Amino acid sequence: MFNKKGLIKISTLLMAALIILAAAVVVFQYKQLDYIFNGKMVAATVVEDLGGDKVKVVYVSDGGEEIFAKAIVKQNVAKGDKLNLYYSKKHTDVLYQIPSRSMIIMFDVVLLFVEFLGWSLVMRMLKKLRKYKKLEKKGVKTQATITSVKNTSGVLGADIEFTDASGNKRTTVYYPTSDIPIAGETLDIIYYIKRTGKIVFIVPKDE
């Protein structure tokens, strides 16, 4: 569990990472889609390995002329291998091996899922930060008493009781982040009560 400063830091970093990831993919795929829709595909033959992902290939132009060019490939190839490559009107001297449209769509689906999970986590963090903001604005300090301790499905929790500013007894559940609560102990809490009657609180020593 993150405290307020931790939530601000991690949510900011996560939002920045998600934005950078989305921007990088847009730039990367713009190049791929430019080659697919505005470029031209040619059947080329590998004639030399240039190291890494670069090879030298030869292909036949529309005019019947053999053209030698550098190509960037996404698989291991050997001399004599035949590949379908694209060249762009903007970069006629370099050929590229572009993934199929189905592979691009699959990649986009996975990316959207990752972005969805990431932004869902960001929204949860921002929701908790709004809780801190409301507590800073409307919160009331008081002492609560631990009335009982329970372990539900491996999660340690404690029933606590306190008297609100109007003199009413209130009960809620406290989930500690460090210490093990003991029945009869008291806790300093900051709370406010929503219009629905739900109690929102924090335990400063846990923050």
Image (spheres, rainbow, N blue to C red):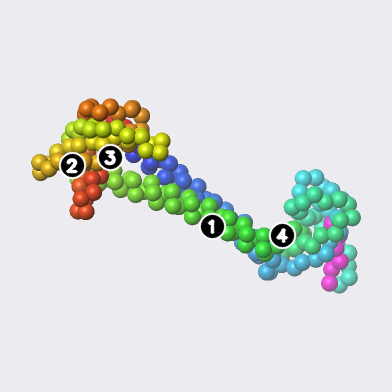
Question: Where residue 155 sits: x, y (%)?
Answer: 38, 36
Q: Quadrant of residue 189?
A: top left
Q: Residue at x 42, y 49 (%)?
A: 122
Vertical placement of residue 3 versus 64, above or below: above
Q: Quadrant of residue 186?
A: top left
Magenta residues span 57-62
Residue 178 is left or right of residue 102, and the answer is left
Name which residue type carries label 4.
Ile
- In this view, the residue in front, 10 or 181, is 181
In the rendered image, the quadrant that contains the N terminus is: top left
| In the image, farthest residue toward the left | 167
First in residue order: circle 2 vs circle 4: 4
Q: Which residue does the numbered mark 2 point to in the structure image? A: 170
Q: Which residue does the numbered mark 3 point to in the structure image? A: 173
Question: Where residue 172 sits: x, y (%)?
Answer: 24, 41
Name which residue type carries label 1.
Leu
Name which residue type carries label 3.
Val
Judged from the image, the secondary structure of the residue bearing numbered disc 3 is strand
| Mark carried by residue 112 | 1
**Mark 2, other Cα within 10 Å: few <14 / some 14–19 / many ≥20:** some
In the rendered image, the quadrant that contains the C terminus is: top left
Q: Residue at x 53, y 52 (%)?
A: 114
The Cα–Cα distance between marks 1 and 3, rounded to whole angstroms, is: 37 Å
Q: Quadrant of residue 10?
A: top left
First in residue order: circle 4 vs circle 3: 4
Judged from the image, the secondary structure of the residue bearing numbered disc 1 is helix
The Cα–Cα distance between marks 3 and 2, rounded to whole angstroms, is: 11 Å
The Cα–Cα distance between marks 4 and 3, rounded to whole angstroms, is: 56 Å
Q: Which residue does the numbered mark 4 point to in the structure image? A: 98
Name which residue type carries label 2.
Arg
First in residue order: circle 2 vs circle 1: 1
